[in-house]
Amino acid sequence: MSIELINHISKHISIDRKDLESVAGFFTPVQAKKKENLVTAGLHCKYNYFVVKGCMRMYFITEHGSEQTIQFALENWWMTDLEAFNKGKTASLSVQTIESCELLAIDKPSMEKMLATHPQMERYFRMIYERAYSASLFRVQFIFQFSKEDSYLHFSNAYPNFVQRIPQKILASFLGFTPEYLSELRRKRVKIGLRGKAGKDRKS
Amino acid sequence: MSIELINHISKHISIDRKDLESVAGFFTPVQAKKKENLVTAGLHCKYNYFVVKGCMRMYFITEHGSEQTIQFALENWWMTDLEAFNKGKTASLSVQTIESCELLAIDKPSMEKMLATHPQMERYFRMIYERAYSASLFRVQFIFQFSKEDSYLHFSNAYPNFVQRIPQKILASFLGFTPEYLSELRRKRVKIGLRGKAGKDRKS
DNA sequence: GAAAAAACTTAAGCTGGTTTAAGAAGCTGA
DNA sequence: TCAGCTTCTTAAACCAGCTTAAGTTTTTTC
């Protein structure tokens, strides 16, 4: 079961085959289809999810009632409303699949039991959250560094395939602007035939 | 040495006195005065810092040459350019004291040795980075949720003492707007005598 | 495979926040 | 203790990105 998780763990820590199989036993495979909510703001957040295959996003509803995407999870990423998951509180963030997904779910009691019986796994999660923290800081840096137009250019140059894969309104909500403005940016790019190039060029 | 760190660790994990003292031995006390750079973008990032007393900030220089503050560290927080620290790379973020500080520093080899001899500490850092990750996600949520004016109102209502403690231009750079605009907001507030109240009221 | 729903586009008018520039006030170190 | 430096303020002109509203295209569902 779940060679992906096993590979991912072995890539980060030294752990023998027997322990790995025992660890894997704490997880439940979940099939989710497109646009399914695995965590819903306002409800109890029971599980933490590992993405075996597919793509999810985390979002919240703003005061104005629109969806704001905070981050994405691709293959080998973990996602849940961590604070709600850890403290048994109601979620304030939602997690939703963008494509149909294969996931592995673990609830809090299993997580604790797993960490107690396999303390090496603390190291794995320490590394996972270090990386997640760095990624989130990088995002803050990104948000402040660039104008909205440049955000779009950088992101679509850095992840052209991913951009093809997700609906534009979700991309717009991730980058922090309106779908209408994204449309305008796309048109501008197409018009002057610079689809793949860096942003600064167009001013020359 | 450093009862603060020892207290902080014991608050998170079960660890006996002897181990705690051994752990504390891996750290070096550092006194830093106001506006001192402990990590500098472009230079080697040798240490991870625990704040015993005082206040620091993390920032970077934008393309336009201005300083953008990403986050603050108060008592009992950790701060460094994590990615640079872990991978032995050049820092891309800077860490600077806002006030004079008492810190504890640890370098990468000591950190690794400490984790190897006291594997319980993996659990401590797992929790620390979980919290840091949550805080950073919350910040992203905050940035997108509020207008610049509301960001200022929320932040200064939530942390009135802290706001008194730091220079306004640093606060402006943390909230993502210009010092000039912060000045304008402050004047508006003072004028209508609503210094301590919530934002929405002022429109009535 | 038709109807309904969702996603995307276009365009005009508007506004929150920036830029620029200058002066006032507050700190700091010799 | 005062000269120089940094921070803070004020104000006017400007513009990046939003809002609104309507039309078009794509996707979903039955």
Image (cartoon, coloured by chain):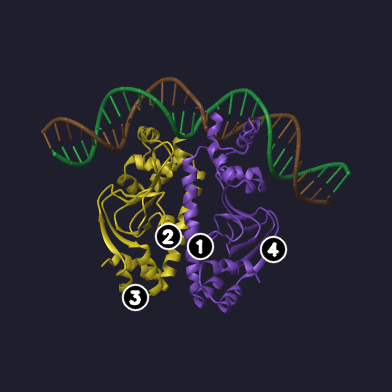
Chain colours: A purple, B yellow, C green, D brown
Residue position marked by numbered label 4 in the rendering: A31
What is the chain identity of the residue bearing mark 4?
A
Secondary-structure class at tag 2: helix
Can residue B137 be seen here? The reply is no
Task: Tell us which disc is closer to us: 3 or 4.
Answer: 3
The amino acid type found where label 1 is placed reads Ile
* Measured Cα–Cα span from mark 1 to mark 4: 23 Å
Q: Could you confirm whether marks 2 and 3 are on the same chain?
A: yes
Q: Do the residues labelled 1 and 4 touch (CB within 8 Å)?
A: no
Please state, as top left, top right, bottom left or bottom right, where the N terminus of chain A lies in the image: bottom right
What is the chain identity of the residue bearing mark 3?
B
Q: In this view, does A198 lie above or below A118?
A: above
Task: Tell us which disc is closer to us: 2 or 3.
Answer: 2
The amino acid type found where label 4 is placed reads Gln
Residue position marked by numbered label 2 in the rendering: B86
Pinpoint residue B122: horizontal percent, then vertical percent. 43, 69
Q: Are marks 1 and 2 in contact (CB under 8 Å)?
A: no
Pinpoint residue A59: horizontal percent, then vertical percent. 58, 51
Residue position marked by numbered label 1 in the rendering: A128
The amino acid type found where label 2 is placed reads Asn
- Judge from the rendering whether residue A144 lies leftward or rightward of residue B31; answer left or right: right
Task: Tell us which disc is closer to us: 1 or 2.
Answer: 2
Residue position marked by numbered label 3 in the rendering: B19
- In front of the other: A103 or A164: A164
- In front of the other: B29 or A154: A154
The total number of labels drawn is 4
- Judge from the rendering whether residue B183 lies leftward or rightward of residue A20; answer left or right: left
Can residue A131 be seen here? The reply is yes
Q: Could you confirm whether marks 1 and 2 are on the same chain?
A: no
